[in-house]
Image (cartoon, rainbow, N blue to C red):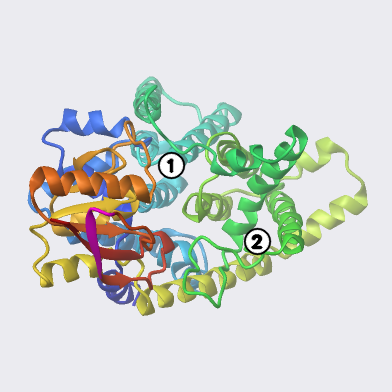
Amino acid sequence: MFTLISLIGMINHEMWRDELQAWLIAVNSSSIPGLFQTLKYEGHPALWHICLYVISRFTHNPIAMQLFHFSISVGSIYVFTRFSTFSKSHKVLFVFGYFPFFEYNLISRSYSLGILFIFLFCSLFPNRYRNYLILSVLLALLANTSIFGWIISICLAMTLILERIINRNANKLNSFEQGKLALSLSIFMTSVMIAFVQMLPPSDAQFHGNKGQQALQQSSSALLISVKHLSSTLLTVWKSYIPIPKLFEHDFWNTNILTAEAIPLSALALILSITLLFLSVILFIRKPIILFLYLSGTFSILLFIHEVYLGYLRHYGHLFMLFLVCVWLSSYYKQSNILIEKMRVLESIKSFVAYISSRKIQYFTGILYIHAFAGIFAFSMDLIHPFSASQEVASFIRNQQLDKMLIVGSSDTAVSPLAAWLDREIYYPDIRRSASFVPWNDRQPVDSQGVLNQVSQLTTQNNTDVLLVLNYQLNLKKSDLTITELSRFDQSIVSSERYYLYLAQKNR
């Protein structure tokens, strides 16, 4: 059922710029070294792009990427339903949850590849003492999917090492097994370093950084900045565990029902974030190895979000996926009170821990029901509304036989999907040249007046009319240009990918 419904969803999903940026980079790379040269400005490891590079040698149609991503998503769900220790009802609820059913299913990004490697790792975990080599390869691949895959892979590896140290006397290795373990560590560490080097931005990279913190710095004191930014970081726990979006607007994506508008509701969400963290720690406190994995992974992800990039829900989803992995792997361990006894807590606290632990199933089930609701809602909205208007715009341009014209697009990030659908370059005023994907090293964003100035120059230099595609309505005029609106496409879920098409002609 998941496969069939997902196929319908994929066919009806209009890819947006982040999906198509990776595809355009792959298509326009003439070699693997050239691909790596471009990727140093993307901030991502290369594994996903290498896969797309291979596919793009056979076709330039971006639907091929969707089909590849679809196979990864279906494979992930197969591994989960076949090998996870959850009940049938829990499996069904998770499969139709927000992240596996919508965010990591319909939207073709590298995150789904990371989820596949995580689930494969979990499926082999019961026999981990015999499978260190295979596990190291899976973790090495996971580290090269995204920064969040990189973080989780390190935490999973550290968990294996910690368990190996704790159980070194109970599970002694012979010389051959020790050699395999050393090889496994070498493979993993090498892969981690390769991924790290790829993600280091060069000095001329123009990454967005922590947008939330930058916005605060413009109007707040240092203390207020710190408090607000820490609150924004902690709120990602709520958004990840309870991903219910705004329900009455079609641009629901990356919103949350409690943090969308009202400050009092955001304060409530912050309290609930801390509560969710606390309850999760209580759930794992009798499984010390799993508690280590949960704490190290969760706080490493939160540290990255706080210090480097505040991000969006697709990034926060790794917090929930880590929680799910911890619940899965915890079934392979016996309960232990060693942490509770060492902390010498009061009997009342021990009773509270026991009570929360006894409600583990209800807690987990409740979260999965919420995810299923959010997943079905988001999936349905994607069926009803265009996710991005770019595919419809490209069809309009072809049908009106405008695809051979000189096309100028602004802003470049928003208009770049058209380059994928039309399989051609577009002139971007932000970089003052024609390109397909957006380069993150030489952009100088221009306003609408600057766009019209460049359009005027282009019409003169090329002695031709210009098709101007904007992601905002043009309210300016230029004396030497006649600008006629051809059409508008303003109903997409991604609000920045609603387009206005104009014909610009030089006055003679």
Residue 65 appears in the picture as rendered: no
* Residue found 52% across the figure and 75% down from its top: 249
Range covered by the magenta-colored residues: 479-485
Image quadrant holding the N terminus, namely bottom left
Q: Main secondary structure of the magenta part?
A: strand
Dots 2, 1 in contact, CB < 8 A: no
> Is residue 481 rendered magenta in the image?
yes
Q: Using residue 248 as the reference point, say whether residue 351 is left or right of it.
A: right
> Which residue type carries mark 1?
Gly
Which badge, 2 or 1, comes first in the chain's sequence?
1
Residue with the mark numbered 1: 149
**Residue 265 seen in render:** yes
Q: Residue at x 28, y 45 (%)?
A: 453
Identify the residue at horizontal 65%, vertical 37% (top origin): 217
Residue 469, how many percent across, how many down?
A: 26, 59
Identify the image quadrant of the C terminus.
bottom left
Mark 2 — residue? 259
| Mark 1 neighbour class, 10 Å CA radius: few under 14, some 14 to 19, many 20 or more | many
- What x and y, as percent, mark residue 428? 25, 45
Point out residue 441 in the picture as x, y percentages from the top left corner: 33, 31
For badge 2, the amino acid type reads Thr
Q: Is residue 273 left or right of residue 169?
A: right
Q: 51 or 377, which lies in front? A: 377
User: Considering only vertical position in the picture, is 499 above or below 381?
Assistant: above
